[in-house]
Amino acid sequence: MISMTGYAKKVFKIRNTSFFVLIRSLNSNKGLDMSIKTPRYLLDLEPDIKKILTSKLVRGKIDIKLSELSTNDSVDLNEKKVRSYIKILKKISPESDPTQLLNAAISLPDVFTSKYFNMTASLKKDFLKIINGVVSEIVKYREKEGRQMAKSIKKYINNILTQSKRLVQLEQQRTRIKKQKILDQLQSISKDVEYNPGRLESEMIYYFEKHDITEERVRLKYHCDFFLEILKSEKIVGRKLNFLSQEILREINTIGSKAHHFEIQKIVVQMKEDIDKTKEQLQNIL
């Protein structure tokens, strides 16, 4: 099991220029939601950074910030290129406002350059190697947190299995009490009311089958066992276990609606509490 949350940072130096990279990972229902912020002259790195994040982090809301730590002005604006871009953009859209054309031109990555180094294939490789290492730290963080969460979730599901075993005895007790109550009522009215014993027997069978929770209890155990099996054998389990937790809750709710027994209802409440805690934890699972 792997968590979707993580945090890692690193200060590093390339060509006597210091940089700082910070990556934060949070849970998300949108798959992989990436936000990458870099200096303008490093925008060429973004496609490769996205490939690293996609291959290693899979899901989550990922914020990555790469910034230069130099205090002096280390960036030059290539005015010649800006004018050239404005000219091209004006040709494409002559009605556009000059301010809009300027904003569009300076948003292009290659109009800014560093005073201290030009991006080369070798420099790009150095940057990506460091970023890849920081992403690997996020992966380790996620795996460590995932192991802790797996322990809690396993405890909740085992609690449900333990509680469901108690239902067997309580169900037998409930059935005996209900049968005796019906028989006592029949005896009290049998002198004044005529009835068909065969029809009465079939109605009682229908009544007890309608309120029987054996099928739900068996399915509940199957779902919980399958849940624990997935938890043990697979790493990326969030979506699958979310679905199973819904099935477990459905069986618990059906048992509660059929029970009509105080002690069984108490167990149902305890099991619902455990599955709610499980579902809450699963929101952060990859």
Image: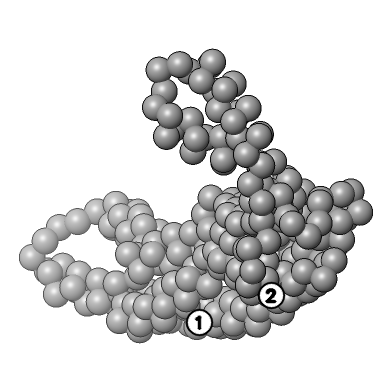
Residue 27 appears in view: yes
Q: Amino acid at mark 2?
A: Lys
> Residue 270 appears at what percent x and percent y?
41, 81
Q: Nearer the viewer, residue 1 or 21?
A: 21
Q: Give me the residue at 81% from left, 56% from top.
A: 117
Q: Secondary structure at mark 2?
A: strand
Asked if disc 2 and disc 1 are in contact, CB closer than 8 Å, the reply is no
Res. 191 mark: none
Residue 165 appears in view: no
Q: Quadrant of residue 268?
A: bottom left
Report crowding for label 2: few under 14, some 14 to 19, many 20 or more residues within 10 A (C-alpha). Answer: some
- Residue behind mark 2: 9
Q: Nearer the viewer, residue 117 or 241?
A: 117
Taking 97 as reference, is 216 above or below it?
below
Identify the residue at the far right of this view: 122
> Residue 20 appears at what percent x and percent y?
69, 71
Identify the residue at the far left of this view: 192
> Residue 227 appears at what percent x and percent y?
64, 66
82 sits to left or right of 55: left
Whole-angstrom CA distance, mark 2 to mark 1, is 44 Å
Q: Amino acid at mark 1?
A: Gln
56 sits to left or right of 25: right
Q: Give me the residue at 60% from left, 35% from top.
A: 82
- Residue behind mark 1: 163
Q: Secondary structure at mark 1?
A: helix
